[in-house]
Image (tube, rainbow, N blue to C red):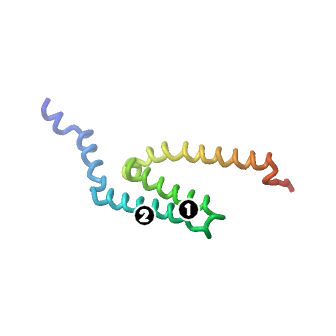
Amino acid sequence: MSDHAIKNPHIEAHAVAHEEHPGPGVYLLVAAILTVLTAAEITVFYVPGLQPVLVPILLVLAAVKFAFVAGFYMHLYYDSKVFTIFFGFPLLLALLIVLGLLLLFAHLQGVLSFTIP
C-alpha cells in the first residue's frame, strides 16, 4: 500500500507541472512592467495633444495590462491551454456583444450610417 502512494502517477505529473512556473524574479518583472504601463496611462491623460485619441490609447494600454495580469498572476500562461480557452472565449464573446451594441445604438442615434449596396 505504501508503494502505491509513492509511485502514484498523478502525484508525479502534478509535481512536474509546478516546475514550469516562474520564480519571484519574473513576477517582480511583470509588476515593474505593470507599474510602467500605469505611469504611461497617467502621462497620456495629462498630455494635451493626445486628448483626441485619449480613449483608444487608454483602451490599448488597459488591454495590455489585462493580458499581463491574466497571463501571469492567474497562471494562464503556464497552465493548460484549455483553461485559456475557457477564460478567453467568454471574454471575446462579451467583447463582441458590447461592440455590437455600441454600433447598434450609434446607428439608432444617427451617429453612424450604414448603407447597403
Q: Nearer the viewer, mark 1 or mark 2?
A: 1
Secondary structure type for disc 1: helix
In the displayed orientation, state which residue is furthest to the bottom. Answer: 49
Q: Residue at x 30, y 48 (%)?
A: 17
Q: Residue at x 54, y 65 (%)?
A: 44
The quarter of the image holding the C terminus is bottom right
Mark 1: which amino acid?
Phe
- Residue 43 percent coordinates (x, y): 51, 65
Along the horizontal axis of the image, is 4 left or right of 71?
A: left
- Comparing 39 with 87, the one in front is 39
- Comparing 65 with 90, the one in front is 65
From this view, report whether residue 38 is shown above or below residue 9: below
Q: Which residue is mark 1?
A: 45
From this view, report whether residue 19 is shown above or below residue 53: above
The quarter of the image holding the N terminus is top left
Numbered circles on residues, count = 2
- Comparing 78 with 35, the one in front is 35
Q: Residue at x 45, y 62 (%)?
A: 39
- Residue 66 percent coordinates (x, y): 48, 53
Q: Residues within 10 Å of mark 1 (few under 14, many from 20)?
A: some
Mark 2: which amino acid?
Val
Along the horizontal axis of the image, is 116 left or right of 45?
A: right
Q: Residues within 10 Å of mark 2 (few under 14, many from 20)?
A: few
Q: Which mark is residue 36?
A: 2
- Residue 26 percent coordinates (x, y): 32, 59
- Residue 2 percent coordinates (x, y): 12, 32
Question: Where, by quadrant of the figure, is residue 91 drawn?
Answer: top right
Q: Residue at x 44, y 50 (%)?
A: 70
Distance Cα–Cα, label 1 vs label 2: 14 Å
Secondary structure type for disc 2: helix
